[in-house]
Image (cartoon, rainbow, N blue to C red):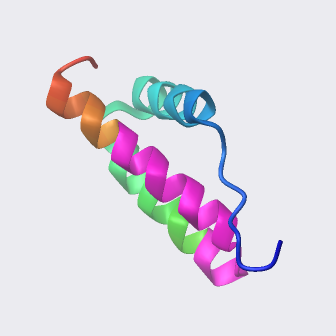
Amino acid sequence: MVGQLNVLSDWELWACALTLERRYGQNVATIIAKRISELAVAGDHDGVANWKIIASRIDQLKEASWV
């Protein structure tokens, strides 16, 4: 459909967030910002949307002190 984003499922987004947090630790925000920038330059709106949601999930993990 035109205008509708292709976003990953909720569990996929959480899995990505957990994996990135564990892999990159304190550097995760930098990694995510770089990837969002790359996707934006490439015009990948779905990718940008997914990575922004993943960033939000990581923030939620940090607030809950789960990671």
Q: Is residue 5 left or right of residue 59?
A: right
Residue sitting nearer the eye, 29 or 61? 61
Q: Which residue lies at the image location 35% right of the left edge and 48% below the top edge?
A: 56
x, y percent for residue 18: 46, 25
Quadrant of the image containing the N terminus? bottom right
Q: Which residue lies at the image location 22% right of the left edge and 31% below the top edge?
A: 62
Q: Is residue 14 left or right of residue 11?
A: left
Q: Which residue lies at the image location 60% right of the left edge and 77% below the top edge?
A: 40
Q: Which residue lies at the image location 66% right of the left edge and 44% below the top edge?
A: 8
x, y percent for residue 28: 38, 43
Q: Is residue 57 left or right of residue 13?
A: left
Part of the protein shown in magenta: 39-57
x, y percent for residue 54: 47, 45
Quadrant of the image containing the C terminus? top left
In this figure, what is the number of numbered marks? 0
User: From this viewpoint, which residue is outermost toward the right?
Assistant: 1
Can residue 27 be found in the magenta stretch?
Answer: no
When the figure is inspected, residue 12 is found, relative to residue 52, above or below; the finding is above
x, y percent for residue 19: 52, 26
Can residue 40 be found in the magenta stretch?
Answer: yes
